[in-house]
Every structure is written in structure tokens, then in C-alpha cells.
Amino acid sequence: MVLACGSSSTPPQPPPPPAAPDASVPDAPTDAPVDAGVTAEHSIDASIATPPPPKPPARVDIANLGAPGEAVALVPVRGKITIFDFWATWCKPCKELEPALVAIARAHPGRVAIRRIDVVDTDSAAAMTYLAPKGYGLPHVRVLDPSGKVLLERSSDGKLDVLIAAVRAAVR
């Protein structure tokens, strides 16, 4: 049994059976409508009914790519703008960037995917392939459109808010 919010664990009880006709009122019809005293001025306001439950937050398409430190192929997710998030467990700004990227993806459900690459350290295959050749640091993102065209590639360079704003602009 599914219980509505605020209900108890006991199921609702059926209404009591109709009362027998009052013997003290002669010839009273038993099926006559009953005036419950509800008038137009005192009608039940439907706007105070229980609101529907809130929708669950949009599901975010997020996944880790490859083994930690591995230089994986950066292939966009079919039909989506793909944010490749290069990060490491020791990188504090990387940890601050993640919730912002998730919020961006949540704001564009079905349109944005996040793929995370754990760089591990500066001499890993992932760092040597994607970051070192162009002097990028962490955190770093590469944003591709569904066809694979680079929309943005940028590191934070100590300005995380600028990086987040750039990612937001790229996915609009």
C-alpha cells in the first residue's frame, strides 16, 4: 500500500453504513438530499488541496572514463554536448568545480553529458596526452558539441568562477 505524505500507517476506514430512517419523523423520505449547510460562501476551496509531490531532480548523465590516469579517447556522447572534466583527487578546485558542472548538466537534461577523467598526477598518461602539450593545469574542461567540434577548452588558471561561466556559455 502506498501512503500519501502526512498519512498514518493505518489504512483509511470505510464510511459507516447509512443510518436507519428516524422513526420519530413520520413519512420522511429516506433518499431525500441532506442540507449540510454548505453554501456558495462556505464552499470547499479546491486551491488548498494537497499539492502534487515535487518532481525528482533531473537525472544527470555523468560517468568516469577509463582507469585513473589513463589517456582515454574523448568521444562526445551521441546527441549531447559533452563536458570532459579533467580532475584529480588532490585538486581542491576540481572538487569545487564538480557541483557547478552537475548543476549545468541538470539545467539542460537530455542535452548535456559529463565525462570525468581522473588525471591522478602530472606525469600520468592522461596529463601527458591532454594537459601537458598545451600547458594546461587542473581543473580543466573540454566541451564538445554532438559532432565533436570543440566549443571550449580551458583550465581555471586560479579563476574558477570564470571557468564555470565559460562552460555555461558554451552549453547554451
Image (cartoon, rainbow, N blue to C red):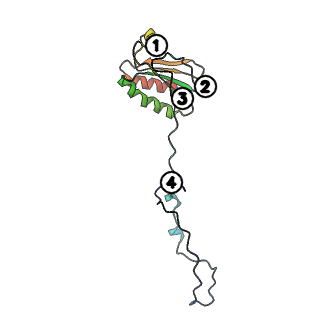
Q: Quadrant of residue 87?
A: top left
Label 1, label 3: how far apart the Cα atoms are: 26 Å
Label 2, label 1: how far apart the Cα atoms are: 25 Å
Picture residue at 54% right of the left edge, 29% below the top: 112
Q: Are marks 1 and 4 in contact (CB under 8 Å)?
A: no
Q: Please, what is the three-letter code of the amino acid marked with disc 4? A: Pro
17 relative to 119 in the view: left or right:
right
| Nearer-N-terminus badge (1/4) | 4
Q: State which mark lies toward you, 1 or 4.
A: 1
Q: Residues within 10 Å of mark 3 (few under 14, many from 20)?
A: many
Residue under label 1, please give it: 125
Residue under label 4, please give it: 51
Picture residue at 51% right of the left edge, 33% below the top: 60
Picture residue at 50% right of the left edge, 54% below the top: 51
Q: Quadrant of the N terminus?
A: bottom right
Taking depth in this image into account, of 104 and 13 the one nearest to the observer is 13
User: Judging from the image, what secondary structure is the residue with disc 1 in?
Assistant: helix
User: Judging from the image, what secondary structure is the residue with disc 2 in?
Assistant: loop
Which residue appears farthest toward the top when viewing the image? 133
Percent coordinates x, y for residue 160 in the rendering: 38, 24
User: Judging from the image, what secondary structure is the residue with disc 3 in?
Assistant: strand
Label 4, label 3: how far apart the Cα atoms are: 30 Å
Residue under label 2, please give it: 78
Q: Please, what is the three-letter code of the amino acid marked with disc 1? A: Ala
Label 2, label 3: how far apart the Cα atoms are: 10 Å
Q: Are marks 1 and 3 in contact (CB under 8 Å)?
A: no
Q: State which mark lies toward you, 4 or 2.
A: 2
